[in-house]
Amino acid sequence: MKRLTLTFGLLALAAVLAACSGASADNPTSAAPAGSPSGDAVTIVAKDIKFVPTAVTVKADTAFDLAFDNQDGAPHNIKVTDGSGATVFKGEIVTSTKVTYAVPALPAGSYGFVCDVHPEMKGTITAQ
Ligand SMILES: [Cu+2]
């Protein structure tokens, strides 16, 4: 019984540590305006089952950080597809949180982005 208690205590501690480190990583409160192509960072917000903005521009042939701010209680992600519909990037599905996706360099062209959970949530990415 004592051993069981100790094991549970360690698990609880690990859970607390994981929660803490996650929270601090998610809290750099630098508020760049959504969608502005400032530098190499791009922000897309998901709110009310919609993406804001629905069109973003990035630098071609340059990997970039895509800040994804899901403000909904519903799960969303961002999947990037090329002109033929092939997936070129797939972000993890998150709920009520902000994450940063590392998107690989995109050759110049037009791309689509969509939520895997809600196919009606769509937008376009222009790499130029
Ligand atoms: Cu969604």
Image (cartoon, grey):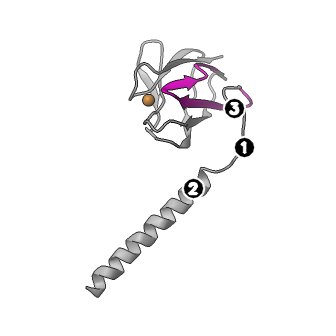
**Residues tagged 2 and 3 counted as in contact (Cβ below 8 A):** no
Name the residue type under label 2.
Answer: Ala
Residue 49's x, y, as percent?
48, 26
Res. 87 image quadrant? top left
Q: Could you tell which of marks 2 and 1 lies nearer the N-terminus?
A: 2
Question: Can you identify the residue that label 2 sits on?
Answer: 23
**Residues tagged 2 and 1 counted as in contact (Cβ below 8 A):** no
Apparent side of residue 6 relative to residue 106 in the rendered image (left or right): left
Res. 36 image quadrant? top right
Badge 3 residue CB within 8 Å of ligand 1: no
Apparent side of residue 92 relative to residue 8 in the rendered image (left or right): right
Q: Is residue 32 above or below residue 110?
A: below
Question: Can you identify the residue that label 1 sits on?
Answer: 30
Few, some or many residues within 10 Å of mark 3 (<14, 14–19, 20+): few
Few, some or many residues within 10 Å of mark 2 (<14, 14–19, 20+): few
**Residues tagged 3 and 1 counted as in contact (Cβ below 8 A):** no
In the rendered structure, find residue 40 and report the number of the disc placed on it: 3
Name the residue type under label 1.
Answer: Ser
C-alpha distance separating marks 2 and 1: 15 Å
Res. 54 image quadrant? top right
Query: Which quadrant would the N terminus be assigned to in this image?
Result: bottom left
